[in-house]
Image (tube, grey):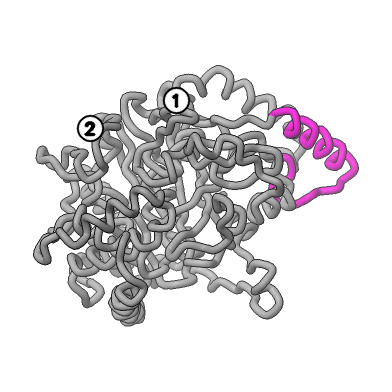
Amino acid sequence: MIRRRKIGCLELLDHYVDRVSRLNPRINAIVVFDEQRARLRARKADRAAAKGDWWGPLHGVPMTVKESFDIAGLATTWGHTRHRKNIAKQNALSVNRLLGAGAVIFGKTNTPVGLSDWQTYNPVYGTTNNPWDISRVPGGSSGGAAAALAAGLTGLELGSDIGASIRNPAHYCGVFGHKPTFQLCPIHGHNLPPNLSTRDMAVIGPLARSADDLALALGIIGQPDPFSARGIRVNLPKPQKNIRKLRIAVLTNAATAEVDDSVQAGVLAAAQCFARAGATVSDSARPHFDLHDAHRTYIHLLRGATSPAVLDKDYAALRRRAPRMRDNDDSYQAWMIRATTMSHRDWHSWNEKREVLRHAWLRFFQDWDLLLCPTAASAAFEHHQHGERWQRMIPVNGQPQPTTTQLFWAGLSGMVYLPSTVAPVAFTDERLPIGVQIIGPQYSDLQCIAAAKFLERELQPFVAPDEFI
């Protein structure tokens, strides 16, 4: 609309600011505002457009980013009260790239404490609600991002993902999200000081209201960092657009992490949509490894990756508990304690298990193009902020399941560095969104997004929540 001169950049920013003022209090999705600088930039964008000087593909487009990304002059807290005064001195690399493409960034969206929950609440900014039902969670850790998009408070979002933190909120809020191939999108500026390093498995990626917007944003942020750019260029394979040539495997459930029938039905609806269009679809093709062993490996690598964020006093307490854990204790809590405190030598053992899994996936994708599976065990659940995450229960087919069990669906692709796109495909009887997770081989990001675009066109486009149209 900006390119066609149907709306001005400042006019569009005013549209979003008005919606935020009216609707954001109900869901508390956008928690940091930078309206003054955004207005100055939008005015400059209008003047540039009048001269035919287009800054890039996002010229004048208002958007927000997850609170965990640095924007110069704004606090980056990750929901920690101890970081309230952590004012960023410079922008994250991805933020600069979005600005370089012409975006007008007018705020930041809420996260859970330390980006470590499938709910979004913290003592700095409070609780974010799901716009489909404010008594329910929007997911996490990019929960504010997905809620803001679903409610029409922003045009595009930038999130991060190590345990489905892009995919899960997209599924819960009925928007599109893409977890890129590991290290495709440089993560610099998405760290609390004094850290500069990238966590194992951690990625950044876009959330949007269409698959096209995912591809657009990925093309902007998915370029080598200044170190790698001296010798590496990104040339992602073009997607196969002939649906009849696609070979698609489908996994709707797993004994390790049971999935609610409503979510399974949504995944099956996506598979049937591909089948009707002539794709080869199989409900029995699988990578050759034990799913429970894969889940155990993921949790150990995940908790190993997040261990630096544990405070010294809490880490010392876990170190004291670890020797008391029984060898046959196969609970999430036992995995978490052992993994958080394991030696670097033990980490290498788990990393070797991952390499075995990566090779199994490599062989699998020689015969299959994509795998469709759930993003989570259920649709969005009611707010539940008491107790440890593994103690909190969600209903799955009428039975309680620890919220941490469904991390299985996060780790299936995340642990082995594969891209995953989530697209909305259905609703529960309670009118809650259901998304499908589309997994492909490394660097098949555009194929995953193209599959989401097919489903958007043939099965279900983005639908706005009734109270936020």
Assess whether residue 55 is covered by the magenta stretch.
yes
Q: CA distance from mark 1 to mark 2?
A: 22 Å
Which corner quadrant of the image does residue 261 belong to? top left
User: In the rendered view, does 396 fall on the left or right side of 318?
Assistant: left
Q: Are marks 1 and 2 in contact (CB under 8 Å)?
A: no
Q: Residue drawn 45% across and 47% down? A: 176
Look at 15% across and 59% down and name the residue there: 325
| Residue labelled with disc 1 | 27
User: Is 136 on the left or on the right of 184, as rendered?
Assistant: left
**Which residue is the extreme one toward the right?**
51
Q: Secondary structure at mark 1?
A: helix
Question: Would you say the magenta stretch is mainly helix, strand or loop?
Answer: helix
Mark 1 against mark 2, which lies toward the viewer? Answer: 1
The magenta segment: 35-60
* Residue at 38%, 52% in the rendered image: 164
Q: Is 190 one of the magenta-colored residues?
A: no
Q: Nearer the viewer, residue 204 or 446?
A: 204
Q: Which residue is mark 2?
A: 429
